[in-house]
Amino acid sequence: MARASRTFTCQSCGAVTSRWAGRCESCGEWNTIVEEAAATSGVAGGPPQLVGKTKGRHIALVSMAGETQDPPRLVTGVAEFDRVCGGGLVPGSALLVGGDPGIGKSTLLLQAMAALGRRGSEVVYISGEEAIAQVRMRARRLGLADAPVQLGAETNLKDIIATLESGTPPAAVVIDSIQTMWTEALESAPGTVTQVRATAQDLVRFAKRHGTAVILVGHVTKDGQIAGPRVVEHMVDAVIYFEGERGHQFRILRAVKNRFGPANEIGVFEMGELGLQEVPNPSALFLGERDGDTNGSAVFAGIEGTRPVLVEIQALVAQSSLGTPRRAVVGWDSGRLSMVLAVLDARCGLSLGGQDVYLNVAGGLRINEPAADLAVAGALVSSITGTPLPRDCVIFGEISLSGAIRPVSQMEARLKEAEKLGFKRAILPTSTARQRPSTGLELTEISDLAGLVANLAAASKPRGREPRTNEM
């Protein structure tokens, strides 16, 4: 009997090597390489190839100019979830949902499946981590005990697929979670790279063959990335992250990949006693408890996917008692903050080398777009000079290393959202006549960061204060 070949697979990135090593050369992680049996047939390796015996069949090639109908949608009724999915679930698609433990992934999907089941669709919820009794307890707590959702508790993928294929395939299936699934074709333990890749491939194949929308729940690593091989993210049609800070009641559902809708779309939920409640107007919620006359605060008009969102950015600059000043950032990129501080120092003469700097995005939202640069700089300068920004003013713009303010995309959508919420003024980059948005707001256009500092310094003089530059 031929000896089964062995391979060594990194459990962090999925890299395959021919021998064991203490450190993975691909991702740099230590003690993550595990010996596994190499699959020569079946789900992981595919059917054996008969070299030289048969030829491949011809495939049909069609013109790109043909018309294709938009895919139908399974609308769950949870508007924020449907929004992130691009308008609803697409039959035959596969979605991967990731998030920190306890953030509410299972709660959200149970609510979505219950809403879809009440609309007449057949839905199945398979849990590999909880017993049926535990899922039922959560459903009763959420008021979903009467929802027509079929439950199952199993980790053997062969039994799960056989059950789903025994009758009419359901409209949607939730697998919670993919790291608990295993197949008999492989000797490795559940949760390993080989098992996750193989079981995900089988589930995606089932979705395409039977037209069932399959939702896979994935664990995340300490870095916030979905655990397992990155190839799983390429297999599925959409990758969605469920984000949120433990101390905040807000949860953000964010699409980072979507073949059937816009990427970077977000949905906002609020965690309450009866589960997750939708937030149709997140801007009003994020700004609901804002203090108007406090320095170090700026309202940023951002774009998340296709949705304009207004959020408060808070900054505090204080004298440091440490040899190395502290830089604490919540909700923004710390490297981007270092760049803004360097530009303020080099181009505007505001020395912050001996100051502690604290930056916070209120409400638990995480901002990624460069258009927040000017709002962050405005909050910092406001804290340094002790001059509050006007309460009815929004601010946005990208800062370059030269100190120039660059225009950003979708300026008109940002301003319309601000006008809808009662704002009267806006500070934004200088734009050409073609780029200038039509709005009823009073616009203050600035071309460089020194102009923002000059405006705030001029506003502080009537208050009897001299702007301080914190020079050492």
Image (cartoon, rainbow, N blue to C red):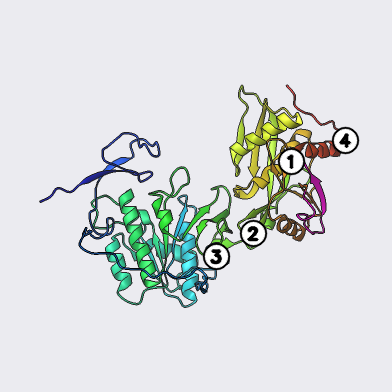
Measure the C-alpha gap from mark 1 to mark 4.
Answer: 17 Å
Residue 132 bears which disc, if any?
none
Q: Using a 10 Å C-alpha cutoff, classify the residue at mark 1 as few (fewer than 14 neighbours), some (14 to 19) or many (20 or more).
A: many
Q: Of helix, strand and loop, which one carries label 1?
A: helix
The residue labelled by disc 2 is 307
Residue situated furthest left in the rendering: 1
Which residue is more in the foreground, 461 or 437? 437
The reply to whether the magenta stretch includes residue 61 is no
The disc, 2 or 1, on the residue closer to the chain's N-terminal end is 2
Left or right, 335 with reference to 134 = right
Q: Of helix, strand and loop, which one carries label 4?
A: helix
Report the mark closest to the observer, 4 or 2. 2
The residue labelled by disc 4 is 461
The disc, 1 or 4, on the residue closer to the chain's N-terminal end is 1
Residue 422 showing in the rendered view: yes
Give the image location of residue 153, x and y in percent.
33, 63
